[in-house]
Image (cartoon, grey):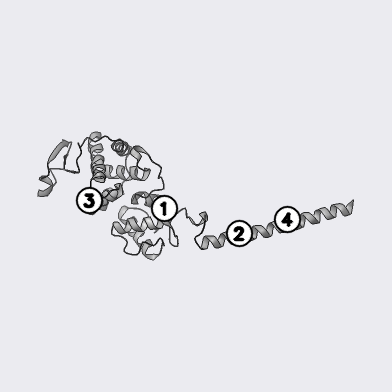
Amino acid sequence: MQRFFSGKNAAKSILCALLAAVLVFLGIVTAENRRNGEGPAAVDALSKYGSRGEEVRQIQKKLKSLGYYTGAVDGIYGTGTKNAVIAFQKNCGLTADGIAGPKTLLYLGLGTGSSAGAGGYSSSDAYLLAKLIAAEARGESYTGQVAVGAVVLNRVAHASFPDTISGVIYQKGAFSCVTDANWKVEPTDTAKRAAKDAMNGWDPSGGAIYYYNPRTAKSAWIRSRPVITSIGNHVFCT
């Protein structure tokens, strides 16, 4: 009887040793796959120096369109990409650590909340639109805030403008607020609701693609645009 139990324990020991060897082998293979950028494990939770993949390509593409990045869109998060992210973060009042975390991605319009929300837009789109509304129209009535959001969406649909919310907002010379202190302020709950209403189709601007404050606008060109309506301090036009 004693010899029987000894043999059984020996068999268990051998089985455990074999299982341990298999797990070690699998761990080595998984680690090698990660180094080679293969398999699901290669996708980083945050894009940072050394990361590779489609998210990095999207970051590079966006930063390139904004004038922060001049390198190749190759999906490799190298020094050039990191420096471009840092420059963007500094301009937006974010922690300039060179890591494309959730907040940086939101500011870029590449947030991880990609599920469709109001009007089929992503949560990242909604955040950026609310941020623009808060920066451009926080002193306006609720209708006036929705109207500013609608102008952005009208531009997205217009052939003469970029076809994304982030593209319209960051288009060079389009909105001065993206380069001043206003852009560092978080959107208010009111601005978030206004963005949602605009994305759901409410357009108090009547289809406008421009707006301006007649008390501060100095451009003769913008003042020459056909006026659709006035809401609060803004004139909306085509």
Spatial CA span between label 3 and label 2: 52 Å
Instruction: Provide the residue designation for mark 2.
Output: 27
- Closer to the eye: label 4 or 1: 4
**Quadrant of the image for the C terminus?**
top left
Amino acid identity at mark 3:
Ser
Q: Nearer the viewer, residue 177 or 68?
A: 68
Instruction: Provide the residue designation for mark 4.
Output: 16
Spatial CA span between label 3 and label 4: 66 Å
Residue 1 lies, with reference to residue 82, above or below; the image says: above
Q: Residues within 10 Å of mark 3 (few under 14, many from 20)?
A: some
Instruction: Provide the residue designation for mark 1.
Output: 101
- Residue 213, x across and y down, in percent: 16, 43
> Quick one: label 4 or label 1, which is nearer the N terminus?
4
Q: Tell me, yes or no, whether the two marked residues, 2 and 4, touch with CB atoms within 8 Å.
A: no
Spatial CA span between label 2 and label 4: 16 Å
Instruction: Provide the residue designation for mark 3.
Output: 176
Q: Residue at x 34, y 57 (%)?
A: 61
Q: Nearer the viewer, residue 162 or 88?
A: 162
Q: Residue at x 69, y 56 (%)?
A: 19
Amino acid identity at mark 1:
Gly
Please, which residue is most extreme toward the front here? 159
> Quick one: label 1 or label 2, which is nearer the N terminus?
2
Q: Nearer the viewer, residue 109 or 36?
A: 36
The image quarter containing residue 65 is: bottom left
> Quick one: label 3 or label 1, which is nearer the N terminus?
1
Amino acid identity at mark 4:
Cys
